[in-house]
Amino acid sequence: MSAAHESWSEATRFAIYYAPPRASQWWRAGCAWLGRDPESGETLAPPRPAALAQPLEALTGAPRRYGWHGTLVPPFRLAAGVTPQTLLAAAQAWGAGRARFEVAVEAATLGRFVALSAADDSGAQALNELAASALRTLGHLRAAQTADELARRLDAPLTPRQRAYVEEWGYPYVFDEFRFHMTLSDSLDDEALRASLTHAWNAQMRDAGPLPVEGVALYVEPRPGEPFALWRRVDFPADCVADEQARVRA
C-alpha cells in the first residue's frame, strides 16, 4: 500500500481502475513506460525507443500522474458516511462474483493520444460490461458533484446523452459512451510522433500475449493534483475463469 491514510481528507478522490497483475509483463512494461510504479511508489527508468528524438518521459507527464491503469469508474470523492473501508468491502463483494478473462489488445491512436485498447469487438464488449457493472454496483458510494463541478463538466462539447450521463453519473463517457483504454502518452499534435510511439509499444509487447483481467484496483489521489497511488487490489476468484467475450455475446 503506497497511499498513506494520514494524508487523506474530504478532498481525497478514489477511482476503480483496471491494473494488470503485478507479476505480469503488462504491469512491468506499462509502469516502466510511464516511469512510475503507482503501487510501490518507485520511480522507474523508461525505455529508450530508437525512433524517438526526445526522451519518453517528456511525452508521458499526464498519464504518469494517474499511474498505469485503465479507467472503469472515474475518480470520485466518497459520499458522506462512506469510509475507504466501506468502499473496499463493497468492491471486494462485487469482485467475488466476477470471472477472470483475457483480452487481445494493441496500442493505437485515440484522438491525439496513444493508448492501449481492445483489438476486437468482443474484447471491447467484455471490458465495457465490466466497467458498467462496477459503476452500477459501486456508484452509490460516490459523493454528489458540486454545482461548480457540474457546471465545469457541462461546459464542454457534449451530446445530449453525454450531458445526461454527467448529470446522473458525474462523467460523460460511461455505459454506451465508454471506451476502455490505457493511456500511453500526453496529448500530442505530431501525428508522426504518435505513430512512432504506437510502433515502439507494439513492437516491445509483440510476444506478451493477451491482457489478463484478473481483478481491479482501488487508486487514490490523496490531495488534489498529487499522483494517484494504487491502494488495494481486488482480485477476482482464481477458480472462476470464463470466456467473458462469449458470455457478453450470449
Image (cartoon, rainbow, N blue to C red):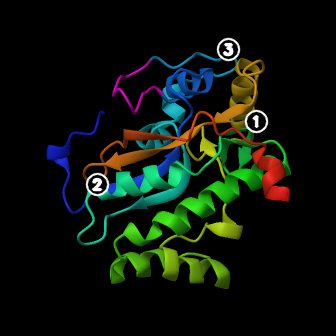
The residue at the point 24 percent across, 61 percent down is: 11
Q: Nearer the viewer, residue 45 or 81?
A: 81
Please state which amino acid type lies under the numbered disc 2: Pro
- The residue at which mark 3 appears reads as 50
Residue furthest to the left: 6
Q: Would you identify the image quadrant in which residue 50 lies?
A: top right
Residue 183 as seen in the image, left or right of residue 116: left
- Numbered badge on residue 84: 2
Q: Nearer the viewer, residue 177 or 48?
A: 177
Mark 3 neighbour class, 10 Å CA radius: few under 14, some 14 to 19, many 20 or more: few
The secondary structure type at the circle numbered 1 is strand
> Upstream in the sequence, badge 3 or badge 2?
3
Q: Which stretch is magenta? A: 35-44
The secondary structure type at the circle numbered 2 is helix
State yes or no: residue 161 in magenta: no
> Upstream in the sequence, badge 2 or badge 1?
2
Image coordinates of residue 234 in percent, x first then y, are 46, 42
Q: Would you identify the image quadrant in which residue 43 lies?
A: top left
Most frequent secondary structure within the magenta stretch:
loop
Image coordinates of residue 39 in percent, x first then y, are 38, 31
Residue 49 as seen in the image, left or right of residue 134: right
Residue 12 shows in this picture:
no
Quarter of the C terminus within the rendering: bottom right
- Numbered badge on residue 144: none
